[in-house]
Image: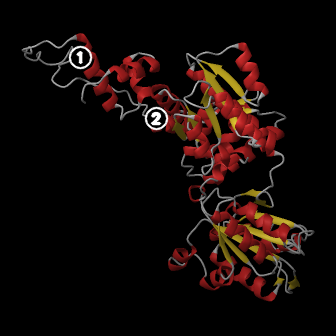
Amino acid sequence: MTHQEHLLPLLVVEDDAAIRELLEEELNDAGYDTLGVPSAEDALALLSHTPVAMMITDVRLPGMTGIQLLQQLRQSGSELGIIVITAFGTIDQAVEALKLGADDFLTKPLDLDAIREAVFRVLERQRLSLSHDAEPNDFHGIVGKSPAMQSLFHDASRLAKSDAPILILGESGTGKELLALAIHQESKRHDAPFVPVNCASIPADLMESEFFGHVKGAFTGANEARKGLFHSAQGGSLFLDEIGEMPVNLQAKLLRALQEKTVRPVGSEREEPVDVRIIAATHRNLEKEIEQENFRSDLFYRLETFSLRIPPLRERGTDIEQLIFALIDKHAESQGKQIEQIEPEALNSLLNYPYPGNVRELENAIMRAVTLSEKGVLQHDDLPERLREQANQHNGGSEITPTLSGEVLPGTQAPAPAPTRWPSLEEVEKRYIRKVLEATGGNKRRTAEVLGIARRTLYRRLEDDSEPS
């Protein structure tokens, strides 16, 4: 089982269509995809060709029982997470199911919160028990199983074996420095220094001295000779982050250093040899910068020959879940905490947020959540407000005030003319339920909240409503 496995659907085996639909919708609202079948035989047929994350099955089913289904799956060697539910639960049945390998046992009438918690526990238990056995799928600590990231890892590994300059392109927060470090670690220079410098953080008038060093007396305040960043990275790699911020006059000297493999300290009359591999990075469009005369074309073409683009998080598919769990483990360990659970609602919000700040924004959100978490559970309330708000918008958080066609609500305009036949209370109730259901886009959970009734009650009333809509 991998971190991605909970993205597989959950299988619900229940012959009562209303209860099956109730379970599926509850789990959908919690962020899971579901498949539903009415019998154990249908479940076995589906499992023969469709992978699922786990299964919830009733005990009493037409034909093979849920207990027999559980037994057959365990005898076949299946490690699928299984929750057994029944309206006729007894201690003996619970013991039998657990002995046969059920992960949990719940009874009807269903407590929907208990169902969600049980599903979450089973999935987390499987993930945590197997996470340490999983093969890491990363590149020197950079996580990514998506085709885009696997292609990046492959290209980076190949380029690392040369000494040619490399240009890393990518949006802010995608991890350009991490990739530069990974390339250094993969290269033959891995035992020598890796020196990162952010070009945007060095004042322009000091940049030349910072890079190439200076001799004593070269300028006011230069009371002694000083080696520059090129000398600090001797034999290793110099990472120039945000190279697009480098002044044009210094770009010319950088190009000379690349071509001649020498540098001239400020105030010196002689060149000094250096053996440094340059890895540069930027979030800017350097071709546009060239058009605006902010970047030298000759330096760009020298760097761009071997360029790598890190995809933004939105292009990395299911990598986000792998990242979420890896970052939770990272920050839990650094804070001396043990995170054993993450609420489904919290995981759903983390998975669905767009992350304009990419991996950096995701990591900051998780660091905050781990810091605030208590009792080993990462909760939805622990997430930054912007993620929680996004989840509320996604779930239709705006207030719904449905009305019946032809009715005027209190406090509005003059009353509508009296109908020739007054509808019965039951008819009005059915029409009102259908209108609310329509207004919520078919979301039964939201409909029940608007109506102020339990979801089970809503399902019963919908089952009884045989009138055409």
Q: Is residue 81 above or below residue 260?
A: above
Q: Which mark is residue 64?
A: none
Q: Is residue 134 above or below residue 302?
A: above
- Name the side, left or right, on which 438 lies relative to 186: left
- Closer mark to the observer between disc 2 and disc 1: 1
Q: Amino acid at mark 1?
A: Glu
Q: Quadrant of the C terminus?
A: top left
Query: Foreground: 261 or 301?
Result: 301
Query: Foreground: 229 or 165?
Result: 165
Give residue 190's position: percent from left, percent from top.
Answer: 89, 69
**What secondary structure is marked by label 2?**
loop
Q: Earlier in the sequence, mark 2 or mark 1?
A: 2
The reply to whether dot 2 and dot 1 touch (C-beta < 8 Å) is: no
Query: For mark 2, what is the residue?
Result: 395
Q: What residue is drawn where x is 63% and y is 49%?
A: 48
Cα distance, mark 2 to mark 1? 29 Å
